[in-house]
Amino acid sequence: MAIDIGPLRTYNQDMKPSSEQTPLTPAVFYILLALAGGDKHGYAIMKQVREDSKGKFKMGNGTLYGSIKRMLTDGLIEEAGDRLDPTLDDERRRYYTLTEGGRQAFSLEMQRYLDVAALVQERQITSHSSVLLAL
């Protein structure tokens, strides 16, 4: 069963490896990418997404926290629990971490991107000589 969190389907609830895996939305992909680098709170995720996308993908609070809520429900991420040193951070912040299902979803999405990039290179589809695919 696919779950919608935006205009496109985002991921399968079972998160089983499959060549038919439904692509992730940009919001879910960038949240998983941000958390692949370690636990983060919401505002840090938002900043990381802006940095990772070089400012091309801007995520507002509604998109971020709506996506986080659905990703928590679907087991892609979970709350990270207690911080190592709570005196160094605002106790109201909730930190999130990837689950095994989230790592798997991210891995499958990255493999899909690599497969498409390899196909573009193989077929010499790109007409821009400035685009280099280092695979």
Image (spheres, rainbow, N blue to C red):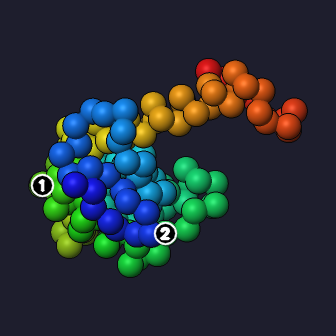
> Can you see residue 48?
yes
Judged left or right of residue 70, residue 53 is: right
Q: Nearer the viewer, mark 2 or mark 1?
A: 2
Question: Amino acid under label 2?
Answer: Met
Question: Residue at the location (34% across, 67% down)?
Answer: 5
Q: Is residue 23 above or below residue 117?
A: below
Question: Residue at the location (79% across, 36% down)?
Answer: 126
Please tell me whether mark 1 sits on a helix, a strand or a loop: loop
Please tell me whether mark 2 sits on a helix, a strand or a loop: loop
Question: Amino acid under label 1?
Answer: Asp
Return the x and y of residue 67 as percentages of the image width and height.
33, 66
Return the x and y of residue 55 as percentages of the image width and height.
63, 61
Return the x and y of residue 117 as percentages of the image width and height.
62, 31
Find the distance from the CA under tag 2 to the CA under tag 1.
26 Å
> Can you see residue 45?
no
Q: CB of mark 2 within 8 Å of CB of mark 1?
A: no
Q: Is residue 45 above or below residue 113?
A: below
Task: Residue under label 1, please give it.
Answer: 82
Q: Return the mark for residue 59.
A: 2
**Along the line of sight, the residue nearer the viewer: 30 or 126:** 126
Return the x and y of residue 53 as percentages of the image width and height.
59, 53
Question: Residue at the location (85% across, 37% down)?
Answer: 127
Labels 2 and 1: the sequence-earlier one = 2
Quadrant housing residue 121: top right
Looking at this rendering, what residue extends furthest in the left direction? 82
Question: Residue at the location (53% across, 36% down)?
Answer: 113
Quadrant of the frame with the N terminus: bottom left
> How many numbered discs?
2
Estimate how packed mark 1 is, as few (under 14), some (14 to 19) or many (20 or more) residues with alpha carbons within 10 Å.
few
Judged left or right of residue 55, residue 30 is: left
Estimate how packed mark 2 is, as few (under 14), some (14 to 19) or many (20 or more) residues with alpha carbons within 10 Å.
some
Q: Return the mark for residue 109.
A: none
